[in-house]
């Protein structure tokens, strides 16, 4: 073999395709070949017919002549076909094989005559036609059966050797099953070594630092020396421009990869890089013993196809790993975001509860005490020992008493709006009915048989309904609002619908209220949808997980 299998660069101007002109002499030879093929075919039909006829059997002579005439006519007709003229050599070879079969049949008939020692008589003539058919069958099957027997013998002596196509099909099947890359490379190397009768197979794989290092040697021996140095960027650039190469190319460009005493030094080596997208992903090096069959063109084509498919598999695996890493990162980010939203909502609700408790236990209690004190002063002024205070003093005390009571009620409403104790004590239904009474709109609450939910879920639904009521009071004053709560499988559905003027969601941008509701429900894994049509009102639908209702507390 030559020093390198890669094709030399074309000389200047050689990149233009040239066309070989077919002269008249070539066409005349093709026609003669087709006529000769028809003649050989006709002779192949006539010869056995004549021999069988002389022995007293076979078809009538005119049948044999007619068949021979048809065969010769086919040869004549083929001379007018351009496709047949281009394939004239193959047609002539096929006709020659048919002629050889005819000679074999005639020989068999003559041998039969020698066995009889005379011309067949009587019932013996009936054996001629079956004998002719048997000889035709033997002549047709002798070649294929002989070749199959030879392959079987070689397989028994040398081990089973699959064709390159079979090896590639097996490789593609293993790659499609998701076999890990390391196992896939080892199986490929072992299969190549066994089926191609190789002395050794090396596979170099791409590393994270952009170099190519030898990762696999089959068979691995105890005497194996240290691994050669990885191939750097410059050497990879050289490989990138290389196809299937031999030891001469290796001596010239990468001599440090050749062992001092090995098959490569004696010419029994081929290498091929697996290149995809301008990047060298792997390098396959195969070796044979010096006294083994030399590498042929079929071996080189098979190696080129192996590295081509290997490059595709490695690129697909790299893309798949990158995709999986990206998806895992997105899942982690989503989980962190979900946890962050949950913590924010939980902290907000805890702050609301603390403010409500501080207002109830602090400012509200002081105002109540002040109201009681004013009432006592008012009663003392009007009593028998009051000294007969004037009417102005009495009216002032009454006004102060009303102011304190109004402040207490406003403070109580504020505390309920921040976080109503009724929600914690009685659940969603009662808390929403109390909120409906405070709303300036006509609000109907249908809680059905909805029981208690986890605290965060109840708080999220409650405040979303309050936000929806505030939006309805702002944008649909005077409308009637219906709040419906239903439990479906493992989730609760809340629906807030008003009969106001509605709007076109495509033309009106969503406000902060809708975003707040989406954030609240999203923090507990819920969703929210808004539908509205001009003149038909607005419907807000929220869905939250309801895994297990909590017991009433």
Image (cartoon, rainbow, N blue to C red):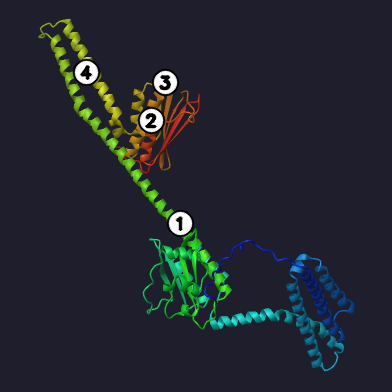
Residue position for label 1: 320
Residue at 73% of width from left, 81% of height from top?
A: 139
Q: From the viewer's perspective, is the residue at label 1 or at label 3 nearer?
A: 1
Crowd class of label 2 (few under 14; some 14 to 19; many from 20; radius 10 Å): some
Q: From the viewer's perspective, is the residue at label 2 or at label 3 nearer?
A: 2
Q: How many tags in the picture?
A: 4
Crowd class of label 4 (few under 14; some 14 to 19; many from 20; radius 10 Å): some
Q: Earlier in the sequence, mark 4 or mark 2?
A: 4
Residue position for label 4: 404
Residue 112 appears in the rendering? yes
- Circle 4 sits in a helix, a strand or a loop, which is it? helix
Q: Earlier in the sequence, mark 1 or mark 3?
A: 1
Q: Earlier in the sequence, mark 2 or mark 3?
A: 3
Residue position for label 2: 513
Q: Position of residue 209 (x, y in %)?
A: 38, 61
Foreground residue, 42 or 506?
A: 42
Q: Measure the alpha-carbon separation of dots 1 and 2.
A: 41 Å
Q: Measure the alpha-carbon separation of dots 4 and 2.
A: 33 Å
Q: From the viewer's perspective, is the residue at label 3 or at label 4 nearer?
A: 3
Q: Is residue 414 above or below residue 72?
A: above
Q: Measure the alpha-carbon separation of dots 3 and 4.
A: 31 Å
Q: Are marks 4 and 2 in contact (CB under 8 Å)?
A: no
Q: Position of residue 52 (x, y in %)?
A: 84, 84
């Amino acid at each position: 073999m030559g020093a390198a299998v890669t094709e030399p660069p074309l000389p200047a101007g050689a990149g233009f395709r040239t066309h070989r002109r077919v002269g008249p002499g070539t066409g005349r030879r093709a026609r003669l070949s087709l006529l000769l093929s028809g003649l050989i075919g006709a002779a192949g039909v006539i010869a056995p017919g004549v021999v069988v006829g002389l022995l007293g059997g076979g078809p009538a002579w005119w049948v044999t002549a007619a068949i021979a005439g048809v065969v010769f006519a086919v040869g004549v007709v083929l001379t007018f076909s351009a496709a047949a003229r281009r394939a004239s050599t193959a047609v002539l070879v096929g006709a020659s094989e048919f002629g050889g079969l005819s000679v074999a049949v005639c020989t068999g008939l003559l041998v039969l005559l020698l066995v009889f020692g005379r011309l067949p008589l009587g019932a013996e003539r009936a054996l001629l036609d079956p004998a002719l058919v048997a000889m035709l069958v033997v002549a047709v099957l002798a070649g294929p059966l002989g070749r199959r027997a030879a392959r079987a013998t070689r397989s028994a002596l040398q081990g089973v050797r699959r064709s390159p196509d079979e090896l590639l099909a097996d490789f593609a099947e293993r790659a499609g099953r998701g076999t890990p890359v390391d196992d896939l490379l080892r199986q490929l190397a072992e299969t190549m070594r066994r089926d191609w009768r190789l002395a050794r197979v090396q596979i170099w794989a791409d590393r994270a630092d952009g170099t190519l290092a030898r990762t696999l040697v089959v068979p691995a021996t105890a005497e194996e020396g240290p691994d050669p140095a990885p191939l750097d960027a410059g050497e990879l650039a050289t490989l990138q421009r290389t196809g299937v190469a031999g030891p001469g190319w290796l001596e010239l460009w990468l001599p440090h990869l050749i062992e001092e005493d090995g098959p490569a030094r004696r010419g029994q080596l081929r290498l091929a890089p697996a290149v995809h997208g301008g990047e060298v992903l792997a390098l396959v090096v195969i070796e044979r013993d010096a006294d083994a069959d030399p590498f042929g063109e079929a071996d080189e084509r098979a190696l080129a196809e192996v590295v081509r498919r290997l490059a595709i598999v490695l690129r697909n695996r790299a893309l798949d790993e990158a995709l999986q890493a990206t998806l895992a990162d997105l899942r982690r980010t989503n989980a962190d975001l979900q946890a962050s939203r949950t913590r924010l909502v939980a902290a907000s609700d805890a702050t609301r509860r603390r403010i409500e408790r501080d207002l109830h236990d602090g400012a509200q209690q002081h105002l109540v005490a002040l109201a009681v004190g004013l009432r006592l002063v008012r009663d003392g002024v009007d009593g028998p020992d009051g000294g007969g205070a004037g009417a102005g003093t009495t009216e002032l005390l009454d006004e102060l008493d009303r102011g304190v009571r109004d402040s207490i009620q406003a403070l109580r409403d504020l505390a309920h709006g921040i976080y109503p104790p009724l929600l914690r004590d009685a659940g969603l239904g009662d808390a929403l009915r109390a909120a409906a009474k405070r709303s300036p709109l006509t609000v109907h609450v249908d809680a059905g048989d909805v029981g208690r939910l986890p605290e965060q879920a109840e708080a999220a639904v409650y405040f979303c309904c309050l936000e929806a009521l505030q939006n309805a009071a702002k944008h649909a004053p005077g409308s009637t609002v219906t709040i419906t709560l239903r439990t479906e499988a493992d989730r609760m559905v809340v629906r807030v619908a008003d009969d106001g003027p509605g709007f076109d969601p495509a033309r009106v941008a969503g406000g902060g209220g809708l975003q707040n509701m989406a954030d609240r429900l999203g923090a507990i894994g819920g969703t929210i949808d808004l539908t509205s049509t001009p003149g038909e009102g607005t419907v807000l639908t929220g869905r939250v997980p309801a895994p297990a209702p909590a017991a009433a507390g």
